[in-house]
Amino acid sequence: MLTAYDAPTATLLEEAGVDIALVGDSVGNVTLGYETTLPVTIDEMASHVGAVARTTEETLVVADLPFLSYGVDDATSINNAGRMLKEEGAGAVKLESGPHTVSLTKQMTELGIPVMAHLGLTPQHVNRYGGYPRQGTEQDEAEKILDLARAHEEAGAFSLVLEHVPSNLAADVTAALEIPTIGIGAGPHCDGQVLVFNDAVGLSEWTPSFSKQFGDVRGEMQRAVDSYVEAVASEAFPADEHAHEEGGLEDFY
Ligand code: KIV
C-alpha cells in the first residue's frame, strides 16, 4: 500500500501493481500546506479520493476519514464514509481507531462500508500526544493495542494499519489476527507495508526516521524547474519548434 492524492500518482501505483492506494489525510501536510492533518475537511478528502478512484481500476482505493468527520455522531460518520463510496468511488474507508470506533466499525461494516482500522500512532491525536511519539512501548499500552486490534477485527475491520509501534508488538498483533496488518514504522513482521508516497519517492523535504526514500524526485523536479528558469531567462525557450506564426494576420505594430 502507498498513499496517493492525485490522478498521476494513482496511475503510477496501478502500473506498479500496488494493491491499495490510500488517500490518506496526510494530504493535509503533504499537499495542502497544513502543519497537521487536523484542518483537512471532508470536501477536501472527497476531491482527492475522486481523483484517485477515477484513474484506477484494479487498485483498491481506501479513503481516510479526516478529523471529526467521524466519531462525533453515528449518522454523520456513516454519511461521510458512505459519500466516499457512493459519490467518489472509493472501495473502503480508514478510521484512526480507538475504543470509540469499535461499534462504528461494526455498523459501517454491516451497512456495506469496508473499514480499515488504524492503531498505534494516530496522528489526529497529535494534541493529546504533544507530537508524534512511538506508541506501545509500555506493557499496558502494548496490551491495549492488542486488545483493540482484536476488538476491531471482531467488529468486522478487513485490515489494520499499525503505525510507529515496536516491531515485536507488530509481530504479536499480526500473529493474533486473521485480517492483514499493514505497517508503517512497525518493522518487517506485518503482512503488508505502507509509506507516504512523497516520502517514498524522495519528494518530501523531511521524512520520518522509519521511512525510506526510494528515489530523488525532489532533486529531479528542482533540476527541471532550474533549467526552465534558465531557458526562459536566456530566451532559449521557447524555440522555433515550440511556436508558430500565422500567415495572413495583419501586423498591428
Ligand atoms: O494519512 C495517512 O497517510 C496515513 C498513513 C500514513 C497510514 O494514515
Image (cartoon, rainbow, N blue to C red):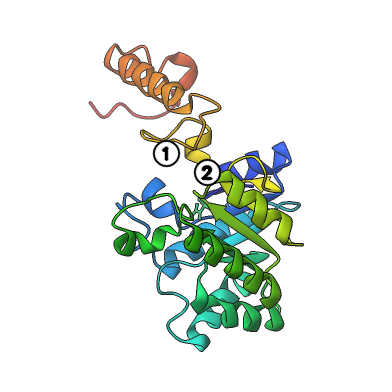
- Residue 250 lies, with reference to residue 24, above or below; the image says above
- The x, y position of residue 107, in whole percent, is 63, 84
Residue for badge 1: 208
Dot 2 or dot 1: first in sequence order is 2
What secondary structure is marked by label 1? loop
Q: Nearer the viewer, residue 210 or 32?
A: 210
Spot the residue most to the front: 139
- Residue 160 lies, with reference to residue 196, above or below; the image says below
Q: Nearer the viewer, residue 48 or 209?
A: 209
Q: Residues within 10 Å of mark 1 (few under 14, many from 20)?
A: few
- The x, y position of residue 209, in whole percent, is 44, 35
What secondary structure is marked by label 2? loop
The Cα–Cα distance between marks 2 and 1, rounded to whole angstroms, is 9 Å
Whether label 2 lies within 8 Å of ligand 1 gets the answer no
Q: Residues within 10 Å of mark 2 (few under 14, many from 20)?
A: many
Residue appearing at x 67%, y 77% in the figure: 155
Residue appearing at x 55%, y 60% in the figure: 49
| Tag 1: amino acid | Pro
Residue appearing at x 49%, y 48% in the figure: 164
Residue for badge 2: 185
The C terminus appears in which quarter of the rendering? top left
Residue contact between numbered discs 2 and 1, judged by CB atoms under 8 Å: yes
Place residue 81 in its image quadrant.
bottom right
Place residue 103 in its image quadrant.
bottom right
- The x, y position of residue 195, in whole percent, is 55, 43
| Tag 2: amino acid | Gly
- The x, y position of residue 28, in whole percent, is 39, 54
Q: Is residue 89 visible?
A: no
Q: Is residue 223 visible?
A: yes
Place residue 235 in its image quadrant.
top left
For the residues carrying marks 2 and 1, which lies nearer the camera in this image? Answer: 2
